Amino acid sequence: MKVKVLSRNPDYYLRETKRDIHKVPRNYDPSLHPFEGLREYTRALNAVKLERVFAKPFVGNLDGHQDGVSCLGKNPQHLSLLVSGSYDGEVRLWDLPQQKCVRNFRAHDGYVRGITFLPDGQQFVTVGDDKTIKIWKTDLPDWGEEEEPTNTYISKSVIVGVSHHQKEPMFATCGEVCQVWEEDRNEPIRTFQWGVDSLHDVSFNPIETHLLATCASDRSIILYDTRDTGPVRKVIMRLRCNRLCWNPMEAFIFTCANEDYNLYTFDTRKLKQPLKVHMDHVSAVTTVDYSPTGQEFVSGGYDKSVRIFEHGKNHSRDVYHTKRMQRLTCVLWSMDDKYILCGSDEMNIRMWKARSAEKLGVLRPRERSALNYSEALKEKFVSHPQIRRIARHRQIPKHIYHAQKELRTIKLKQKRKEANRRAHSKPGTVPFVSEKKQHVVEEQE
Amino acid sequence: MDSFDATYSDSSDHEINEAQHSTLLAAVSELDVKQRVKPPSRKESSFRVSEFHLGKGDADKNTVFIRNLTKSLGQQGSHAVITKQLRSIHHNTRTLPRPLEKTVAARIQRSVGFKNVKSQLGRWDAVVYSNQAASQLSFPLKQSTVTFQTVNDFVSKLKSQTRTSLEQQMDEILNNSPVVQEERKEEEYQLSLAEMCERRREMARLRAQQSYMASKASRQKKIKSKKYHRILRRERIRQQLKDFEVLQKTDPEAALQQLELLERTRAEERVSLRHRSTGQWARNKAVRAKYNKESRQELAQQLAVSRDLTQKIQVENSSDDEEEEDSSVKVMPPNTDNPWITPKAASEVEEFVSEYRKYWAEHNRKSSEGTGNASNICHNKGIDRKGVASELGKECTENHSAAPANESIEGQNDKGNEVDKNHIQSHSSASVNLRGENNEDGSIDVEIPIREGQRCSDTVINSTEPEGKQVSPKKGNSTFEQINNIVEILPKEKTLSPKKLNHTTGDVNNRSEVQLQKGKLLQNKQNNRAKQENDSAKIVPKWKISSNKQNNIEEEEVDTSTVMQLKRKILFLNKEKNISEEVYNNAKIQPRRKRMSLNKPNSIVEQVNKRKCAYSFSSTGYKSKPSESHSAVIATTNSWTVTPIDIERSKVENYSGPKRKNSNKNKGNRIDNGTSKNTVKIGELFDDMEEKLKEKVDKKLKTLKLEFKVKDKNKAENTNSESDDESPSLKFKQVDVQADLDEELNEQPHDKFQEDESSCGNLNKIVRESSLQEREQELPLDNIDPNKFMAMKPKHLQTELPDMITRGDEALDDNEDESEERQMTITEAFAEDDVIAEFRKEKDEVTEKSQPQSVDLSLPGWGEWGGKNLPVSSRKKRRFIIKFPEVAPRKDSNKGSVIINEEKNDKVVPHQVSELPFPFTSVKDFEASIRAPIGNTWIPQTAHRKLIKPSVVTKLGSVIEPMDEDMLVNKKMKMKGMP
């Protein structure tokens, strides 16, 4: 008797090699997939859960400074090099892949206030409390050679910040006045002054390279045109701005870190009110840096946490903190858009992943496509409450939590008071003022 | 005072220093004066020029003024010009306005500077907004050019190592060769990455096209349709012919070669037995041909192929045709063995002609009797030096009365005797089989491919008329046209231009043509009366054959009786004509006999066939069975009519058909006029329409313009209001909208987790309790008997419904009736909507469903004596029906108007979206965005890949530099085939 059995050609379901992809015949007829929505939702849910599982942003710690880290400098040409300055005047060069200090020397007496690289990445400029500007070589000095700056400029006034021009051999410093220096001149080529207050941060626009912005201690931000006119506009805020950073992809956008726990993104052409108010910090924001893609920025503050904001959003997408990290003095987004570095009061430089759950290193195509798919799913179902809940959930230190609570009550109280005032006064006398408009006091010509 | 003393003591010794003394005095005097600021004095030259250095001049008496200097000029005439100038200067000078305050000036400067900065930054709008809207951004923006180590680089490294002398020598030789140098030149301009990509893409495209072509060709090759291949072959041959013509003009040598090739194929064809009627296949076909039209056609085609292939091609063109033609006869070798090659003696020809005449006379007589139908056989034979073109046209029709063959009217057309060979072919081949048979249904159409006919005619023209320029029927000509052409050409061998010929021999031609027409007409029984009348009218000499030559061929309808009658009439006419014509033609033919094709009566067809070498293959049909081909037989059996396919012509025919129905020319003219009038009217109508349309369009345009103006104004106002914003209008609309979540992180401290939840729980409790309380309060309100509502009787209000709802003006006409009607309609509309009853029913169903059923375990018939349909015993009920324990009453059991769903799935709720996320404005859009799957389980891989494209792509391990000004100017060259 012959027994008939169902048989398949093994070619249809067997792989030739172990690495082959399984052939999966598919029928895309939607009527055959009644649960596609649900399945996709489940996948999204799993993806977002996995993201939280893999979210381990801390990469490493660079310790070596004997005093608090005051400033960081990123090399525009090389990804692996980092320069940091500390309160005791020491400058350290770090090899990031190895997480090692490759070189350290005493650059200034007192604080190192600012570090900036020259466009070629071969040299960097440091400024310190000793009123000097020094240019150093990035490369190690030869055997027997002493650590010496290639050039030293002595300024007449205190210098607290420095920023190098994107292309030309020219840098700007700030202190009592804003000065523009050329590398081969000992005297500043331009000096700008508007008002008598001191300036504590200066930043060259990386795209419209002649544009300069400084933060003054009279709570103002001043814009300069270095080519001709000098200062062109000043905007005074409620509290002073600590740091200012230009968007490297959008010429007219800059973001400043403010004392009032917020960050403000401005359009240079419309300074009456900021485009966005980014608020999540619970203490003064001291530093900010844009990602090289211009899509995000990172900020750090006195609340001992690093926050990452998306460019057009009011709230942070992530918060990084560790138990021992103290007040942040400087943050830096690496030039390959992958890492964040932060220097803090407690002498350490910490290295974080820019996207906490991202897998580092080279991805296989299938891996990449799977990750892309899960990303797309997360984006697609972002408005679903469960997914949103999981994606937005963060553990934070207690002090931040309490501070947030406190801030919330303060804000509620203010609102309530305003509402009461509005209710008990003549209509129209207590106008509604939008959040954006509240923080800018004045725009001065 | 020490210094004072010192100076004093000094002065006692020397004379007093004046300068010192004066300063001393000044210092002393200043002690009293209040103003301590000294007037400026000139000291050193400096770059700093300040407005404060320009003090008031008259403070010091020592100041020198211009007027003091010019005093010396005096009133002298020689200095008049200078004094004048000075005076004018003095007169015109005005003090400059005071410079602005420093702060004010600075502010102005700043505002101007800011304006500049703004405009400078405005340049970036386009780039920035396009990037914001882009579905994917890839960084770094500037992809550095990639350099590969080429083979040459690698080899050059090797080359640098030491080599043998031989190698070096070889290298020198090679390097000095021009080819290598050229290559080097090319290498100098290395391709950029983009160019390389472009080149690769181009190559890929070419390859793809090649593969498409290959696959297409293979597909075409597999097509089995004979028709398709036939058409293909025809097209190919047509193309070849065209090419050949072109080649003849451009490159005669190549054309000659081509000809040789053709000759070769011809020879091969002649040698082989292919395409003959002798094969088994052909014989079978021949047997079937009697009954089957298709097989007939196939056979005819087959033979046509061989004829085509064996057609001798005439190339030589000489000016003196006659001489050659004369000589050609002489040149022919007297080969007695081959009856095909034997030259025809003049006597023979004469004999032939005389016989033919006899036949003609007889034929005429018969036709005059009008007993039968006309059938004609036309044997045309062109004898040439090359002895090629012998054309035999045979058009026979057979009447159902089976009358013997009559004379052929066409026979008279001895000048224009070129009939398509196909006719001969088909006739001759089929004549064998169809001999002695009567086709009751009249005519059978044999479709002859037009092109072949053309070719035949072409070749004939080539052979008979070396000048070759006059006529070459290129369009799909019917046989008639060909005949016409030949008719025109043949007499023109004495270098007459065709036009002239038309004029000079117009009469002759036309007449002959007319006759030809008539002959055809007789053969084709399908012609109706009108056409025949028309034809008779066409005897007018100026009649053109081309205008209606298809009359004869088209129609299929047969009205035998009328046709018969008509034929008789026509034949009568023909007879007279024929006689006169015959004489004329014969007279003409005589001197040219040698090269003229001859018309023969059927009786001598065989004879001719045997003798004429020029018959070549066309006569083979006869030859194969010569004994069977009887003149009479041929005449009777050949009942096929030829229907060349010419759509255009037929169309023309159809169009001109109605005109032709009128035999009277004047009438036709009248109709023409009428139609022209009609056309005029139509034209007017069109004009009117156009005008109307124009007016309409103008109106519309005006209104549109007005609208636009209004809009523009609005816009302008808007822009005015927003002018200080200067918002750029370059913002893009996001292509694919996705939920844009911008909210605080849900941040909780590590150990606060529990506590928080508990607090949350407390909150929830509170909320629940409060809601419960509320509900309790509301409960008595809910407990209302729905019957109360039922008790309410609808009141019919007398008020009017608004016009919007009613039908407006109708209501005005008859109010009362309408209102009543309306009430009726409303009640009707809600007649079946007993909402409450329905609801109650629904509720009952739900409650019933929710009620648990008792389980019946009893087995029917078990433990009982009786049959079925017995009532279940109480004992059984007691034992085997398990009652479900009483459940709590439903929550909605007391609430009349509510159904509380107690089985609601609470687990799903937290997963559901409760409010519309930000960028979406409608639930529909949001649902659509969620509904479409993006996984490759449900959509194709390509679509999946597109949908999961990340919004930002960065290159691993590369520095992303800030945007550059190049982005403003450097437009990326768009690659071919890139999206």
Image (spheres, coloured by chain):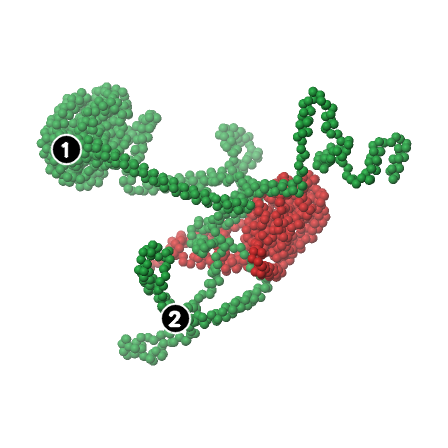
In this view, B58 is above or below B589: below
Q: Is residue B258 left or right of residue B65?
A: left
Quarter of the rendering occupied by the N terminus of chain B? top right
Name the residue at 59% across, 42% down.
B115
Amino acid at the residue labelled 1: Ser
Q: Distance between the Cα atoms at labels 2 and 1? A: 105 Å
Q: Which residue is mark 1?
A: B375
- The colour with which the image depicts chain A is red
Depth order, front residue of A308/B686: B686
Q: Is residue B834 left or right of residue A40?
A: left
Q: Please indicate, yes or no, whether residue B847 appears anywhere in the rendered image.
A: no
**Image x and y of residue B870, in percent:** 28, 77
Q: Which residue is mark 2?
A: B788
- The colour with which the image depicts chain B is green
**Image x and y of residue B35, in percent:** 78, 40
Depth order, front residue of B52/A315: B52
Label 2: few (<14), some or many (≥20) within 10 Å? few
Name the residue at 45% across, 56% down.
B923
